[in-house]
Structure formats: C-alpha cells, structure tokens
Amino acid sequence: MSSAAVVIIAILTLPAALAAATLQKLMHATLSFAVAVVGVAAFFFLLGAEFVGLVLVFVYIGAVAVLIVFTILLTRRDVGKDRAANWGGAFLAVAVFGGLTWAILKTQSVAVVAPHIRAVTVKRIGEALMTNYVWPLQCVGLLLTAALIGALVLVMEEKR
Amino acid sequence: MTPTLQLFLVISAALFSIGLLAVLSRRHAIFILIGIEMMLAAANLNFIAFWRFSPQSQTPTGVMIAIFSIAIAAAEAAVGLALVIAVYRHYRTTNVDHLNQLKG
Amino acid sequence: MINQSIDGFLHPNVSKSVDQIFVYAKLWLLTWLTAAPGWVIQIASSLINIFALLGVFLTLFALMSVLERKILGRIQNRYGPNRVGPFGLLQPVADGIKMLIKEDIVPARADKLLHFLAPILIAAAAILALGVIPYGRNMTPFTIDGGILFFFAVGSTTELAVFMAGWGSNNKFSMLGAMRAIAQMISYELPLIITVLPVVMVVGSLTPDRIVAAQAGYTFGFVPRWFVFTPWGATAFILFFVSGLVESNRTPFDVPEGESEIVAGHMTEYSGFKYATFFMAEYIGMFAITGLAATLFLGGWHSPVSVLEFIPSYIWFFAKLSALLFVYIWLRGTLPRTRVDQIMNFAWKFMLPMSFTCVIAAAVWHYAGRGLRGWLWSLLVIAIVYTALSMLLDTQRKFAPRVYRFAE
C-alpha cells in the first residue's frame, strides 16, 4: 500500500463525486456517481477488503444505479436541468468538511500505520456470517424482504 | 511513504461533505437520493479504514459492518425511489420545494 | 505474480511441456526483466496476460462471426459467406474494413458523452469478465479470491451501459430497446446467479481455480466428476445456459435487438466502428458466459476420459467452449423469437423456483452422502418441484390444428 496509489484513486473519486453532486443533467450525474463508487471500491481493494469492494460494485452499480435510471425514466416531465448548488448548501458542506478534518488532524491516536493482517478471504467472511453474525444476517434478510415488498406496494397502480 | 489512517479519514470526510452538498442544494428528489448514497459509501469507507488500521484487525468486524451497511443502503434506495415515483404520480413533480403540503 | 497451481494434479500421461507451454513462454519473457524492481515485474506480467487474452479472444471473435454465418447458412440450406478467402474464412477482414471506413454518424440532438461512452463501457465490461476464467492448468489470467463475484459484478455494469446507449441516442426506438434489454437482463440475472450457488456451496470457494480442481478425478474409473453429471448440476447447467442466452441477448431472446420490430434497439443510432464494438462486446460476453459455464459445470480444462489426458488442458477448454458456442448458434438458427411477456413469465415463474430447487437439491445431495443415495434423493427433489411447477403453470391451451376464421 503506498500513498501514491491512495492519491491517484482519490483524484479519480473525489472529482467524480463532485460532478455527481453538481452536474445539471441527471443522467450525467448518475454516471459520475457510478464512477465515484468504482473509486470507493478501489479504496476497499487497497485496504484489503476485496469482498466488500466487489459487493459495493455489484449492489451500487448493478442495482442502485439501475433503479435510479429507471426512476429517471418514469418521472420524466421536468428531467434534464436542475440548479447546481446554492450558497447555503455549499457553505454548510465546507464547514462540515473543515470541522471533520480539524478533528481528524488534531487527534494523535489516528496517526498510525497499517499493521500486517491475514487476507480476509471469503471463507472467513462466510464463517463469521454463519457463527457470530447469524442473527444480523437473518434480520437483514427480513429487512430486505420487507423493504422490497413495501417498495412494490408503493409503486403498484391503484385498482380503480 | 506509507499512508496513515488520517489520509483515509480525510478522504472519507471529503466524500461525506460532497454528499451533504448534494443533499442540501439540490431540488430534484433523485439527486438527493444520490447524495444520501454517497454519504453511506463514505461512512463505509470510514469503517473499513478504522478496521484496517486497528490493532485487532484479525477479526473481520469492519468488513461485516460494511457488508450489512451496503445491504441496508440498497433497501433504502429501493424504498426511496419507490417513494419518488409514488409522489410523482400524485403531484406530477419531483421538485422537493413543491412538496410542502401535508394534505394531498 | 505467477499463478501458483492450486490443482497440482498432473496425470503421469500428461506431457508437461506441451500443456504448460504458454506458462513457460511467459516465464521466459519475464526473465528479460529480472533486474527490474518488483512492481515492474508485476505490471509486465499483468500486461503479458492481458495481451495474450486480447489476442486469443479477438481472433476467436473474428472466427466466430464468420463461422456463425456459415453454420446458420447450412441450417437454412444455403452456403454462408464463401467468397473471401478459402471457404469464406477471411470474411472478418472484409467486415472489419467495411466497418472501419463507414462514416460515424451521431444524431444531432444525441447526448454526445453518453453516446460515445456506451459502446466502450460494454466492451470493457465484457473483456474484464474474461479475466478470471481458468483457461488451462495454471493459466488463469487474474486470480482473485472472489472470482465468481467479480465476474457477476462486472457483468452487472453492462445493464447501465445498455441504458446509456438507449438514452444517449435520443430516439424512441432506442429507448424502447434499452428498456426491454434491461428488463430482460435484470430478470435473468437472478437465475444466473442462484444457479451458481449450488456449485459454490459444494466446492466451498468462490475461486474458479478451486472449482475446477474440485471436479478432478473419476468415479467408477470412467465417469468424470464434473458437476453436470449430478442431478442438481445438470439442472443448474441448463438453467445457467438459458440465462446466459438471455444475458447475451441472443435469439430466441433477442427482443432488444428485434430486427423486425424496433430496428436495432439500443444500437439503432450507432454506425461503423461503434456498431462493431457493440457486436464485439456481445460476442465476447458470450465467450465469457460459456467459459464460465464450462468452468463451473463441465470441469473446466479437465478431460472427460482418462486415456485422453495427454491432450493439453487448454485444448480441452476451448473444445468445450466451441461445443457450447455451437449450441448457441444452433439455437439461433432453429428457434423463433419469444415475446417479451413470455420471457418475463418464464424467468419469474419457472426459472427462479427451479434455481432455488437446485440449491436445495445440492444440499440434499451433500447430506445424503455424495454417492448413489445422494444422487437419487436430489433427483427426487428436482422431479417433484418440476412436476408441481408444470402442473401449476399450465396455461390450459390445447395444441390443435389452427382454425382460420377469414382466410380460406
């Protein structure tokens, strides 16, 4: 892991995220969001959590981005243009970023270097999921089922 | 030079504030959802960074939290987008400034 | 750096030098760089893998485009292209020249960025997916721990690119084609992934190398231990194959590019080289899916009989790939196109329950001992569910000679 790799991936991700937040056309913003997600997945790969990176790409680009694109299709009357940014929002975002960075740089205990770890293979994740985290797994399954049934009910056409 | 934890936290903070910018300054409901998803991704990055640099990174705790967080983010995106479609059917607009009446 | 062999299984009959000829060639190429630092050697190794992959599969794409037309022609009782070169085999050269010199027309009100990026993204996703398939003993380009997940994650970005193509063209036919394509791809992604689950469950790993290694050996001395010879494996293979057909938008599921209905669907407004890129991406997607099917169910690069093991492993892999591609072409020449609602019904009402049944049947096979008893029990599970589904989904339509009301 080298700082050069981190900086290169950050140069890819942060402008893409900024573009997703400020572009006027919806489709372009969605695609910049997809690029930003790829950048975050690259970070995960660098940090040794490859499975999470792949799941991120799968879920965010394969599912969430496609959902967003379908919604853009179905709500098409005033698509296309939107206001880029207003001063209140920009000020608050910069303030939040400044506050967080100040807190991070002030804290001494986070200036550590990464220790060497065993690679987190899918086998270990599977074992953890089935032993320590089996109740969260079932709860998330239930949550996903409920959320998707709820989404379906919301979007169904009302019977006349 | 090896990167320290601070570098990752600063990047994650930047991503979070960009997501916050999208949520606060956009009028179209879908853009706000994109901003929320970006904030969630930044939080996940935070978790993984902390897990990786912690002294007990033998247990995959951070990875587990991130996996569950991604699953929940997907569920929330689905419901949010269904809400946007339902609101559009009713009010014919996705501009959140126009959704200011409680009685439909 | 160099892919270590996970399956060191090397039968005494196998001639190691012929089998590993490409691995030795790459090692020889890398000896020119022994003086360089570690990261240079890594990058050089990856680049050699990438160029080899691109060279092989682009040639295969060119070859397949002409062979498909010839086989389709023979099915339709005519010769295929036979003017250019011996037996028409240089037709791809003519096609390539034609595509390259065509004028590149972009609609005036199209979204330039999306219109430009869509074919590139689709081709990139298809080629990326090729990188994790084991082509021979020790011949996987990139060994990733979650290889199967990488394959599907990359494949799922294709949907977004198809939508980009449809939206960016600013054309109602393109939009319609893109929506049909995405609806079809999303519906069949579920059976595609769930049918892979039994294999992953039984092997216990997501790495394609380990999955191939788990299919080594022979039961009773002559039946190979491929997963296709188990009941859940056979069902899963058929379901995976059909889902692969749908994912590649091939007849009988080529509604997105239904030529008689919506011109060319999401590819309508593309001309010249961009259309060739779409074409190439579709074929390379087909290679990727059939390669994965061969890896997961047909034993990868293993040979089916022990006496033929002297034939190199990559020859076996490409033989299986060619057989599956021949079935693809055969289906294209024989079956008519299905309707969109028929496709959706089929996916959600039949293929999804059958995929879940495969998972259950694999578990039953495993827990009833993996021998004859397990085989019979899992066959029973699949037969019960299949019969129940067939009875439930019966549309009560009788097959009878057609009655014309007005035309006599």
Image (tube, helix red, strand yellow):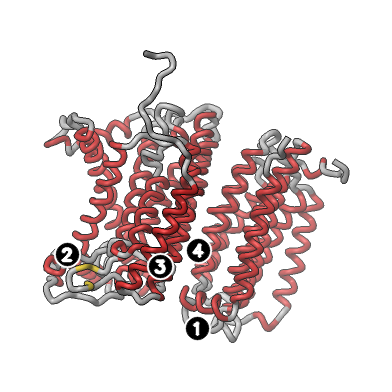
Instruction: Please tell me whether mark 1 or mark 3 is closer to you in this view.
Output: 3
| Position in image of residue A87 (x %, y %) | 80, 50
Residue C272 shown left or right of residue A1 in the figure:
left
Q: Is residue C86 above or below residue B36?
A: above
- Provide the secondary structure element on which disc 1 rests: loop
Q: Chain of mark 4?
A: A
Cα separation, mark 3 vs mark 4, equals 26 Å
Q: Are marks 1 and 3 on the same chain?
A: no
Q: Chain of mark 1?
A: A
Pointer 3 or 2: first along the chain? 2
- Provide the secondary structure element on which disc 4 rests: helix
The type of residue carrying mark 2 is: Pro
In front: A112, or C127?
C127
Q: Are marks 2 and 1 in contact (CB under 8 Å)?
A: no
| Position in image of residue B95 (x %, y %) | 76, 41
Residue C19 shown left or right of residue B49 in the figure:
left
The type of residue carrying mark 1 is: His
Cα separation, mark 3 vs mark 2, equals 31 Å
Residue on which the image places disc 1:
A116
Q: Which mark is residue C297?
A: none
Cα separation, mark 1 vs mark 4, equals 22 Å
Cα separation, mark 2 vs mark 1, equals 40 Å
Q: Place residue A69 in its image quadrant.
A: top right
The type of residue carrying mark 4 is: Leu
Q: Which mark is residue A54?
A: 4
User: Could you classify mark 4 by the number of other residues whose Cα lies within 10 Å: few (under 14), some (14-19), or many (20 or more)?
Assistant: many
Q: Chain of mark 2?
A: C
Residue on which the image places disc 3:
C362
Cα separation, mark 4 vs mark 2, equals 33 Å
- Residue in the picture at 21% in, 38% down: C71
Residue on which the image places disc 2:
C312
Cα separation, mark 1 vs mark 3, equals 38 Å
